[in-house]
Amino acid sequence: MRIASWNVNSLKARLDHVLDYCRSGQADCLMLQELKLSDENFPHQAFADIGWNSVCHGQKTYNGVAILSTFEISDVTRGLPHLRQEDAQDEQSRYIEASVNGFRLGAIYLPNGNPCPGPKFDYKLQWMARLNAHAKTLLGTEMPVILAGDYNVMPQAIDCYDAPAWEGDALWHPQSRAAFFELSNLGYTDAIRAIHPVGAQYSYWDYQAGAWPRDNGIRIDHLMLSPEAADKLVNAGVDKTPRGLERPSDHTPVWLEVAA
């Protein structure tokens, strides 16, 4: 089974690109981030027309995540569990989880966190604490778990064309990176780095300053696998082709192949 994750930076603007990607046969399951539309405006019928199932956790104008698949999607949950009473007030649609073909999948759109320091960075760290707590709980299910999406974290210097230029940014902040590596400490495997331990594997290029033609990219889209899922990992990579399309997202799909 091939599973991909893609921050589409507005599903309405990129719907044709996403449908073409689904039709291409490059994935059996696709997790989307930054839909920028409400649940009632999600184009379920467009995906049904090409034989794909879909579930979403949308939000008008901002955020939003979805899981699409040619397989049945079941046992859907939306949002992360709360760690504090204040978490119950979180209305941002950034996480959706479901079971697909024997795997438990979580689609993630982690907060950016800038400006840093500040309330947005505090929210990012608290959100990551909630994610890590839930990721630990998922390990107890002994299901193969894949937590995929836009983490808005560059884990290592190799994941950025110019790491020193990002000093002070929430995506490169030591606390952000430490929170990301907590997943590894729990036992989750970074699928891209498991297959490609060295070399740039960028998944995002800014629209400005010629970042794409210069390959001034960063890797912030990740596929994190529980031990049960990592045991099934066959291959993983980044598909740069969609970033070169007309009116593309600033992200491109990351993907993995697992033995179902």
Image (cartoon, helix red, strand yellow):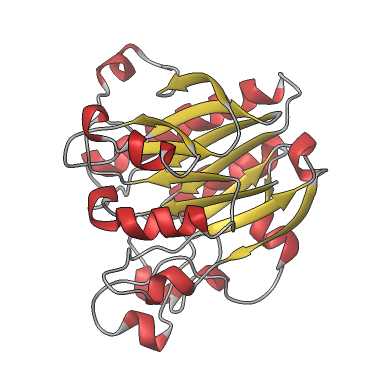
Residue furthest out toward the left:
61
> For this view, does 228 lie left or right of residue 152?
right
- The x and y percentages for residue 114 are 26, 52
Q: Image height check: is 120 above or below 89? A: below
Residue furthest out toward the top:
85
Q: Quadrant of residue 56?
A: top left
Write the residue at 73% across / 26% down: 143
- The x and y percentages for residue 30 are 51, 46
Write the residue at 65% across / 60% down: 192
> For this view, does 86 lie left or right of residue 181?
left
> For this view, does 7 lie left or right of residue 180?
left
- The x and y percentages for residue 168 are 33, 62
Q: Nearer the viewer, residue 182 or 253?
A: 253
Image quarter where the C terminus lies is top right
Q: Nearer the viewer, residue 78 or 179?
A: 78
Residue furthest out toward the front:
49
Q: Nearer the viewer, residue 181 or 242?
A: 242
Q: Quadrant of residue 250?
A: bottom left
Residue furthest out toward the right:
231
Q: How many marks?
A: 0
Write the residue at 41% across / 40% down: 49
- The x and y percentages for residue 170 are 35, 54
Write the residue at 49% across / 72% down: 240
Q: Image height check: is 148 above or below 197? A: above
